[in-house]
Image: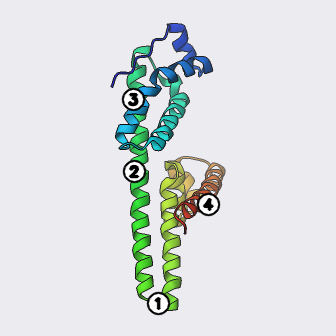
Amino acid sequence: MVILVLLTEEEFRKFKQNDPVIVEKVYHACKKNLFNYFVIKTRGNHELAKELLHTTFCSAMESSSKLKTMENLPAWLLRIAYRRFADHQRKSFRENKYMNIIKQQEKSAQRNSIENKGEETDQETRVLLLHMAIDTLNEDYQKIVRMKYFEEKKVDEIAGILGKSPKSVESVLFRARKNLKKRMFELAKRHDL
C-alpha cells in the first residue's frame, strides 16, 4: 500500500503540534488507502473499518510529536493502523473466548435445572465478566487491580513494587475500579447478560 503525503517542513512541524488544518490535510491524503486497508483486513466490514480508521488517527494525533522525520510519516501511519487492527483482533479474541465459556455454562445450567446450580452459574458468569473487563483495561490498571485483588497485596506493597507513592497507587486504583465498573456494564449490555 502506498500512502503519499506531501508536506513542507513548516507543515510537518505544524503536524507534530497537531495543527487542525495540517492534520486534516494528512487525514484526507491517507484516508482512502487506510480505509481500504482496514476493509481488506476486516473482510469487508465497512463499519469496523471506519472505527479502526478513527482510532488510528486518534492514536496518530496523540503521538505525532514523537515522529522524527517527514519521510517516516507514511510508514508510521501504516504501523499505527496495523497495531490498531491487532489490538482489535486481540480484544475480539478475548471477548469471544469468554463468551463461549459463558454460553457453555448456560447450556450446562439448562441441562441441570437444580436451583443451587443456577446460582453458581450466575456467580461464574459474573466472574468471567469481571475477567473480560479486566482484560480490556490498560496495562497499568490491570497490574494494580490484579496485585490488589488477586494477589491480595497491600497498597504499600504495590507502591514498592511499582516504584510509586502509596497515594499515587490509591489514585490509580480508584480510577481502575471506576473504569472496570464501566467496562463490566458495557460488556454485560453488549452480550445481553
Q: Disc 2 to disc 4, how far (Cα)?
A: 21 Å
Tell me: 2 left or right of 136.
left
Q: Are marks 3 and 2 in contact (CB under 8 Å)?
A: no
Q: Residue at label 4?
A: 181
| Neighbourhood count class around disc 3 (C-alpha, 10 Å): few under 14, some 14–19, many 20 upward | some
| Neighbourhood count class around disc 1 (C-alpha, 10 Å): few under 14, some 14–19, many 20 upward | few
In the image, which is nearer the foreground, mark 3 or mark 1? Answer: 1
Can you say which quadrant of the picture contains the N terminus?
top left
> Dot 3: what SS?
helix
Q: Say above or below: 91 vs 29.
A: below
Q: Residue at label 2?
A: 90
In the image, which is nearer the foreground, mark 3 or mark 4? Answer: 3
Q: Are marks 3 and 1 in contact (CB under 8 Å)?
A: no
Mark 2 vs mark 1: which is more N-terminal?
Answer: 2
> Dot 4: what SS?
helix
Q: What residue do we see at 39% from left, 32% from top?
A: 36
Q: Disc 1 to disc 4, how far (Cα)?
A: 30 Å
Tell me: 2 left or right of 135.
left
Residue 78, image x and y in percent?
A: 39, 29
Residue 172, image x and y in percent?
A: 61, 51
Residue 46, image x and y in percent?
A: 45, 41
Q: Are marks 1 and 4 in contact (CB under 8 Å)?
A: no
> Dot 2: what SS?
helix
Residue type at numbered disc 1? Ser
Q: What residue do we see at 42% from left, 64% from top?
A: 98
Mark 3 vs mark 2: which is more N-terminal?
Answer: 3
Mark 3 vs mark 4: which is more N-terminal?
Answer: 3
Q: Disc 3 to disc 1, how far (Cα)?
A: 52 Å
Q: How is the image coloured?
A: rainbow
Tell me: 149 left or right of 2.
right
Image disc number at residue 113: 1
Residue type at numbered disc 2? Arg
